[in-house]
Image (tube, rainbow, N blue to C red):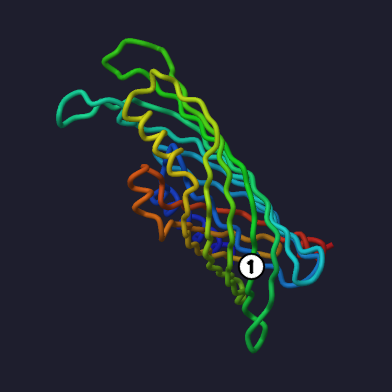
Amino acid sequence: MISRAYFLVAVSLMLVFAACTSNRFYTPNTMNIPMLTEAGQGTVAGGLTTGSKNTGWEAQATYSPVKHLGLMFNHFDLRHKGEAPTNQSSFFFFEKTPYEGQTRLTEGAVGGYYQVGPQKEYLLSLFTGFGQGRSENRYSAPPDQQSSEIYVSDWRYQRYFIQPALSLKYNRFQVGTGIRFAWVNYLDGNISSRVGQLETQRIELLENSSPLFFTEMAWSIGWRLKPVVISLNSTAVVRGKNTLRDLDLASNYVSLTLGLNIHELKKKF
């Protein structure tokens, strides 16, 4: 049993390292798919993702105060780096500027859940929520310019979402899938005039296109070692890809989470 858990963790970590995407404007966070079945149940979880150009962590929680009613909390923090085309140096080539940044999002949701199936083995849920976040990018001078000056762009954003999901628990495994209809609204921000023309135009296009609408799909596969759950999760944008490409937004996110079922912990004691 323990060896299987270690094997799942090892495979999950390899997939997380290989599949993460980095972006300086928007990245879909891990979809929190509830596994609630009755009143008094609650789960807290921490997640991580890492790659050559990003590192991130998450905190999630779900709780059912009364039967069929659920509460949800998500916090997302991603640090990223890369190179952004900021100016055109010739007719065919763009000058690229190194950058580092951070994106944060905190949101809450309320919804309902209901068990279906011959043995009540399936769990349907529907949640709606709201969150606020902030993005910041810090641009360095190009390598050919011997300067330590840092230029900054930052802005706030809001996200509203509706999330129907389906999950199943079977022996030691639990699986879940969901769809998130997300509306992202970019608010006020600051852009340094030294950031560069191309990057400034892209940020202005992002703000002028707001609010943006995305349809995101997710799946989660977990290994249950009561009261702990180890899960591999993936969330990807399936509708709105043209907008993502035009605005240079990330389209998918993969994470590994470690969850604790509080109600199962109480039973042990």
Q: Residues within 10 Å of mark 1 (few under 14, many from 20)?
A: many
Rendering coords of residue 76 (x, y %):
58, 44
Q: Give the quarter of the figure containing the N terminus.
A: bottom right
Q: Residue at x 15, y 32 (%)?
A: 92
Residue type at mark 1?
Leu
Rendering coords of residue 231 (x, y %):
56, 60
Q: Residue at x 71, y 62 (%)?
A: 227
Q: Which residue is outermost to the front?
A: 208
What secondary structure is found at the residue carrying circle 1?
A: strand
Rendering coords of residue 83 (x, y %):
34, 31
Q: Which residue is denoted by mark 1 in the rendering?
A: 126
Horizontal arrangement in the rendering, residue 61 relative to residue 211 (left or right): right
Q: Nearer the viewer, residue 218 or 128?
A: 128
Rendering coords of residue 268 (x, y %):
80, 64
Q: In which image quadrant can residue 139 be found?
A: top left
Q: Which residue is outermost to the top?
A: 146
